[in-house]
Amino acid sequence: MALCAASSALAAPPSPPVRERLAEWLILVGPGGTAFPAQRYADFLAQTPPWPQRVRILWRYQNALSQTTDPQILNALCPRYPLTLPAAFEACAPHLPDAASTARRLWLSGNALTVGEEQTLFQRFGQSFTAADQWARYEALELRGQFSAASRQIERLAPDQQPLARARLAERLASPDADSLFASLPADLQSDPTLIRYRLRALRRGDRLDEALSLWNAQGVALQQASPSHDWSSERISLARALLLAGRPKEAADLADDTTMAPDTTDRQEAELLSGIIALRELQAPARAEKFFRPLQGATSLQMQARGYYWTGRALQVADRQQDAEAAFRKAASYPTTFPGQLALAALTRDESILVSGKSSEVFDSSLLQALQTLPTPTAGTLSRTDLLEAATDLVQAGDPDHAREFLMMLGVVNPSPEGQKAVADAASRLGLAAPEVFASYALARKGIALYPQGFPDPYPSASTVPDGLLPAIIRQESGFDPDAISGAHAVGLLQLLPAAAKDVVRKGHLGPVNVSPAALTDPQTNLRIGNAYVSQLLERFGNVIPYALAAYNAGPHRVDLWLKADPPSEPLSEDGVLDWIERLPYRETRLYIENIEASMMIYRVRNTHAG
């Protein structure tokens, strides 16, 4: 059967012309495309190369299979594509050449199954699942955060595996019985690497830093050395940051100096950056700090290169090597699209409060504009997958930019080279699609290439009550100017607003009757109005200090209240005080969020001010 399916796929007719294929695609992915016969979805899925929303079409294909009763159709279609829907597998099981293997793959995937689906699958095929399979399913569920299913799965584990699984889940959930479950394990299980990582995190988050540091020294060091990974480095630097916030810089410095990962990895570079900042700002050891900062100058990304030069300049300043410091700042300032590059420019122009006040001098503005305008223009290459570009062009001409955006985003994925990303940005500019242009600029920045003025569109100018340039900078970071963007947390639209939070903003801002449904929040003007009000409310709450407001937008106001209480910048508020506060934030995502938006805000503001 599998051989026949493969032969059938090889003999599939060539894909139709783009326009004909696009018409069918729009039907199959549209709101009315949920109830067609399975054969129709299968015919489209057989066409190559793949197009956007393939996962949605596969889901609709499997849903159609689950409602199909004709054995001939099931015999022909069930083996074609991997089944991930339990209902489709149930309908297809008698028509698969090896149903047990498919059942095992479903079981091991860690996908969420209802209690009934679990029971049905286990009753029919459980006899073929090994003890190793059951443990693998538990680990997959644990990793995916499917904690209820993981808890049920523990009962299916071998008796000698259950105590470790219970202890791991308790640490992961910070359960009250976590300590007792850990203590009850035999010594060999207490050294389980995943359990130790989970326990380190639970102790750190519970502010039990002495216990966390003791466990790290007793077991974490050796386990990380034996098997270096992002997970170990992430927990290590998180513990270092917690110690730093607790006023224990020497212990934080020892922990931050993590050399287990390769020099070109983000984990290693983040460790070097934090180590250097601790040495410079906490231990007053500029020579030691410089040794950590200099390797960052050879990083790949624009942001990390600029950090390397900027912080080297700061270290040289403290060492009273002013000429060398200015040379480092000039080098950092040649990265004007980055936050550290702009800080370096502020150091050169003697602007001392761009973070605190959100304002800058005319000298800074003109210098930044000149640096931006003299950036080299990347070279565009020849695009592969011109079918995607043709489809996007047809959709734009038909007045459907939302679907066109999907095709250009996929075009960016299949053209990852710098030349390809520049060509995608050019296509997006021609078609008036901001999001693919922005994401191409992100990809180029990660490769060490600045894209300007492309990558900084502003297709939704609006009357704003917040500092000039701030709103488009937030939009660029949040959605890339995609009005239909929806996050995994169900935040919607340009400014990624949660409907419940939007309702609260409308009430507090006395905005009158405003529809805050998810559909309404995809309207750019509605989203902009509520988003502007929310940013204004955050600025008012946090004393008009933009980095505090941005941290609150990203991580939540309550969390920022806690951070400010745990690590209050000295008064009067200074540039270095705010910068230190940013660099000590526990979440890398929030640090980058603030820095990226600050940099974009300056670019938008300077460009708008000097547009003429």
Image: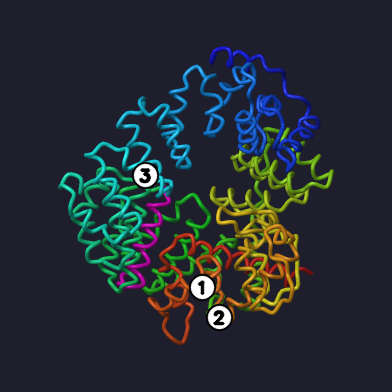
Range shown magenta: 265-287
Mark nearer the viewer, 1 or 3? 3
Q: Which mark, residue 541?
A: 2
**Residue 607 image point, x, y percent:** 71, 67
Q: In terms of secondary structure, where does tag 3 sit?
A: helix
Main SS of residues in magenta:
helix
Q: Which mark, residue 557?
A: 1
Quadrant in the picture for the N terminus: top right
Q: Rate crowding at label 3 as few (under 14), some (14 to 19) or many (20 or more) other CA atoms within 10 Å.
A: few
Task: Note whether 34 is above or below 568 in the view shown.
Answer: above
Residue type indicated by callout 3: Arg
In the orientation shown, which residue stands out farthest toward the right?
398
Residue at 34% across / 54% down in the picture?
172
Q: Which mark, residue 194?
A: none
Task: Note whether 483 is above or below 363 in the view shown.
Answer: above
Mark nearer the viewer, 2 or 3? 3
The residue singled out by tag 3 in the image is 152
Q: Is residue 454 visible?
A: no
